[in-house]
Amino acid sequence: MHHFADPIDRALLNDWQRDFPVTARPYDVLAQHLGTTELDVLSRLLAKRAAGQITRVGATCAPNTISASTLAAVAAPEDRIEEVARIIGEEPGVNHSYLRENDWNLWFVATGPDRAHVDAALARIARRSGLQVLDLRLVRPFNLDLGFSLRDEPRGGIVPIPPDTSVLEPGDRAIMQALMSGLPLEPQPYAALAAMIGLREHAVMARIRALIDARIVARLGVIVRHRALGWRANAMVVWDLPHEAIDRAGPVLAASPGVTLCYERGIVPGLWPYRLYSMIHARSRAEALGWLHQAASLPELRGVPHLALFSTRCFKQTGAMIAPERNSA
């Protein structure tokens, strides 16, 4: 666990992972809360980004609202892992790619403006690698992405209210893409973002507030790289439960300590029977296994077959692709 010696650093990275201000000078608002200056906040964030402790200050998007995404996996032979990971990473819509401890060893999230883009990316990966791709589509989430506590409290999940996509307007995709790429680290980031997409600052801020209120923006704030901050153990635990049993088990698992994300996904008959997914992030493998043991002894999960797929390498971690690449029609 990264106990920052500097209390301002710790508060900056812990307290501003969500509810980031949507106001003309947001870093100045942070500075007032932290008892420092706007310039100091900006230079700290620039340093943390350069050190790889944060990826950006920006948004995470509720899945499959403004764009399409899926979790996918391939079983790469041991001697082809680097090559296949490179093929996966070359797809612009792939935003997370991990090596995990299983025969299905390369796991990735494929995103795109719509489902056809995602399907095309999976087909290209299958063709270029010669490997079958498991397409594990989201059925429903059981908790929200709340970020990571850098203090010692494990955070239980909050059962989400579905996003309201009826508020979406034509220009929102460009705004979301900019927020996923990251807000500029300069005094007036929304003005800079507005200039990039040819809108006025007040209009952009109004749309961002609407997207937050509609829960299309899952969170807006500092996106930390948990591994660089001491959360070294990352296990995706998959549970083999029938759809009906997940009604009860999902919410209970989502609220279990150490569980940062919890979803139901579709299966691939004969190859991958697991419907319920939970992410556990911990400081060590032993701690992660402790959280797993606690979850597995819940009445709703007792005796349920499950696998803990620890990640051993991260190949790629970026924001989702929700607008088509500018240069590709």
Image: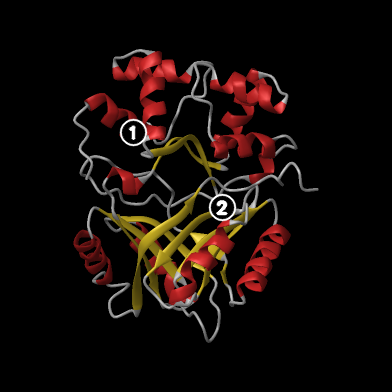
* Residue position for label 1: 13
Where is residue 217 drawn, in percent x and y? 54, 40
The residue under the point 60% across, 21% down is 192
Q: Residues within 10 Å of mark 1 (few under 14, many from 20)?
A: many
Is 329 drawn above or below residue 297 in the view shown?
above
Q: Is residue 274 visible?
A: no
Q: For the residue labelled by badge 1, is the local secondary structure a helix, a strand or a loop?
A: helix
Gap between marks 1 and 2 measured at Cα? 24 Å
Q: Is residue 287 visible?
A: yes
User: In the displayed image of the protein, which residue is found farthest to the bottom?
Assistant: 270
Is 231 drawn above or below residue 223 in the view shown?
below
Q: From the viewer's side, name the closer residue of 48 and 213.
A: 48
Q: Residues within 10 Å of mark 2 (few under 14, many from 20)?
A: some
Where is residue 228 drawn, in percent x and y? 32, 45
Where is residue 233 drawn, in percent x and y? 29, 58
Where is residue 212 drawn, in percent x and y? 54, 36
The residue under the point 72% across, 34% down is 171
Q: What residue type is labelled 1?
A: Leu
Kindly check if marks 1 and 2 are in contact, taking CB atoms under 8 A apart as contact.
no
Which of the two labelled residues, at mark 1 and mark 2, occupies the earlier sequence position? Answer: 1
Q: What residue type is labelled 2?
A: Pro
Residue 63: assigned label: 2
- Colour theme: secondary structure
